[in-house]
Image: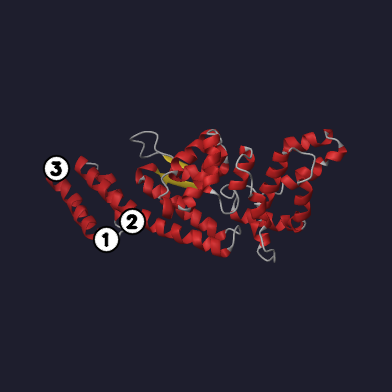
Amino acid sequence: MKRAQALAPRMPATFEAGRVIALADHALPDGNAYPLKATAALLRSNKPFVDKLDAELAWIEQAPLTPAVRKYIALAVDCSYPDRYKERSDTTNPLERRREVPINAPPLVAYRAANCANADTLGLKRVLAAVPQFDEAAYALGNVVVWFAGETGGDDARKYYASAYGRFPRAAGITFMSGCGLLPRQRPHDEARSVGGGGCVVRLGDGVLRQQANVIAAKIEQVRQSRRGSEEFRAKRIAPLEADLADRRKRNQTSAFNAASMNARLGNLARAAELLHVAAQSPDLADQVEKLREQLVQVPRHQ
């Protein structure tokens, strides 16, 4: 944006570069990268501009830019404020009409239309199939997988976030989602290494399931606090996420018990005890945890 602002004085007055930049600057940042309080403050400060957004969108559609650039800017800004249509009496949603792009639309436009409000998964996959190096689409798909983890299992998120992180390692949102544990372990015995981003820190030795649970828990809170989409839409997204979170926590506890048993057999008693603390959170494993703890207590007596 700073580069565009620096170039603006060189443009002809009829181009209205300042107006173009002002419109583009009101597209909201990545929700994974911005604190919720800051987003709320930004929405409040942007309200006067959003109140006149229809006129600005109508203008940009006729601005002296290439059709793809006009469409991208309009979509980026309109997609940032889907709630503004809730109280209208329009029989059709103008945002949905704006998202209708031809199948042969430029990848940039197709991506922006698909990554908007209720994301179009198939649209994003078509973009990535046409342009495999379109890592922004990979990141968007990773977010969709996490949102619908209760239906998808969430496993595909790794490959999407790994692709996006490889291209944009300093992007706050990508770093946060990747650092919360969806990227695979780099070394077989890298148990003590911590990874993190945006305040999310996990121990790889505690298992991928726990890391994914951390991501889902963070996503639930983000959706709960977000103002994007309707309340009904957010409730529908939270319900499967909560179910998936409970399932992953239970599986993580079972995995921790299995790892504790293995470490006990190998003589890693301290690590076994640490993992049993995680496993003990599951009522279903209470008897097994207690039995293994008794075995750990007895081990020194025989040494």
Q: Quadrant of residue 51?
A: bottom right
Tell me which numbered mark, 3 or 2, is placed earlier along the sequence: 2
- Mark 2: give few (<14), some (14-19) or many (20+) Cα within 10 Å: many
Q: Position of residue 94 (x, y in %)?
A: 68, 56
Q: Quadrant of residue 271?
A: top left
Instruction: Please name which of the two marks, 3 or 2, marks the residue nearer to the observer.
Output: 2
In the depicted view, which residue is nearer to us: 177 or 106? 106
- Of marks 3 and 1, the one in the foreground: 1
Q: Which mark is residue 167?
A: none
Q: Which residue is mark 2?
A: 250
Percent coordinates x, y for residue 161 in the rendering: 49, 40
Query: Which residue is identified by label 3?
Result: 303
Judged from the image, the secondary structure of the residue bearing numbered disc 1 is helix
Residue 211: image location, x then y, percent: 41, 47
> Amino acid type of disc 2?
Lys
Q: Are marks 2 and 1 in contact (CB under 8 Å)?
A: yes
Residue type for callout 1? Asp
Label disc, if present, on residue 284 of the rendered structure: 1
Q: What residue is at 80 percent from the left and 37 percent from the top?
A: 8
Between the C-alphas of marks 3 and 1, the distance is 32 Å
